[in-house]
Amino acid sequence: MILTKLITHFFTKLAGAGFTLFVIFTFLLLQNDFDMYEFGESISSGFIWIVIYLYGVICSSLIDFLEWKIPRVNKGIKALLYMAAGYAFFLFNGFNVFTLIAGTIGALCSLLFYFGTYLSDRSKGTTFAFAIFVPLFFIIILNIDFTEKKQWHEVSEDSSFTATFQYFDGKHDIPITVQAGQTITISIEFVNRNGGGYGYSVVNHKDKLVGMTEVNEGVMKFTASDTDVYRVVVKGDDLQGGVKVNWKITDPN
């Protein structure tokens, strides 16, 4: 009996988290004008998932404990406690304009969490939908590459990569093997014919960003701490034009 109640309680909290996730991610999808690549990038932030599923579940459980211990905690007070928990997360760095805005958003998200648990208490179907199927759906989305390329033409050589395209929305990886201790200097030049967005980054095999030193505009370098296949990731946002990447690897003196 106790185990059943604990499992039910846990799934109710997961449903609250899933409902919050659903509302936030739906807003992000609309904000990105249904651009699936941008949407996938938006929901890939581990911060959102940790706050909702770890901080949210813990705070919601503590509030339930207070409600159990203090009979005077009614639904109105409970809602205020959820809002306070949403604010509290952003107040650790002091009170300022940023924490006020972020805290307000956090309070609204906390109320979404509360409403999600309320819906879950009233329907097993809602519980399973938001506790299991909603997060599973977004996890699947995270593992799909929505990059779109049109008339993409590329040329790869030992120390350069060139691509021209009619349309580029997403990312393209350029792998470069660098030995430990070697220094690689990378220059990147985009051709932008339509005012689209673009950018780039360098990551290791664990998809961790590599810290680089700026040499000149569009020219960066770093020294490899480990032998690895590093990836120059070029990104386009509804971009028309091209990109050229050159690199030079030098051995340690």
Image (cartoon, grey):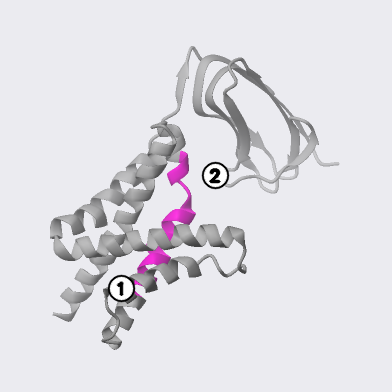
Q: In the image, is residue 33 above or below residue 11? A: above
Which one is nearer the viewer's eye here, 31 or 183? 31
Q: Quadrant of the N terminus?
A: bottom left
Residue 58, image x, y percentages: 38, 71
The one of 22 and 128 positioned closer to us in this rendering: 22
Q: Residue at x 63, y 18 (%)?
A: 192
Task: Find the residue positioned furthest to the front.
Answer: 76
Q: Tell me: 165 left or right of 127.
A: right
Q: Quadrant of residue 8?
A: bottom left
Quadrant location, the C terminus: top right
In the image, residue 181 sits, relative to residue 68, either above or below, namely above
Check residue 133 for magenta coloring.
no
| Magenta span dominant secondary structure | helix
Of badges 2 and 1, the one in the foreground is 1
User: Residue extending furthest right?
Assistant: 253
- Which residue lies under the disc numbered 2? 207
Q: Which quadrant holds residue 203?
A: top right
Q: Is residue 6 above or below residue 34?
A: below
- From the viewer's perspective, tell me whether residue 98 is left or right of residue 116: right
- Say few, some or many: other residues with alpha carbon within 10 Å of mark 1 (under 14 / 14 to 19 / 20 or more): few
- Between marks 2 and 1, how big is the CA–CA gap? 45 Å
Say what amino acid the circle numbered 2 marks: Asp
Can you give x and y, in whole percent of width and height, for residue 172 in the image?
Answer: 53, 28
The residue wearing badge 1 is 76
Region in magenta: 41-61
The answer to whether residue 106 is visible is: yes
Circle nearer the N terminus (2, 1): 1
Q: Is residue 77 left or right of residue 2?
A: right
Q: Residue at coordinates 69% horizontally, 46% vertically from top-left?
A: 211
| SS category of the residue bearing label 2 | loop
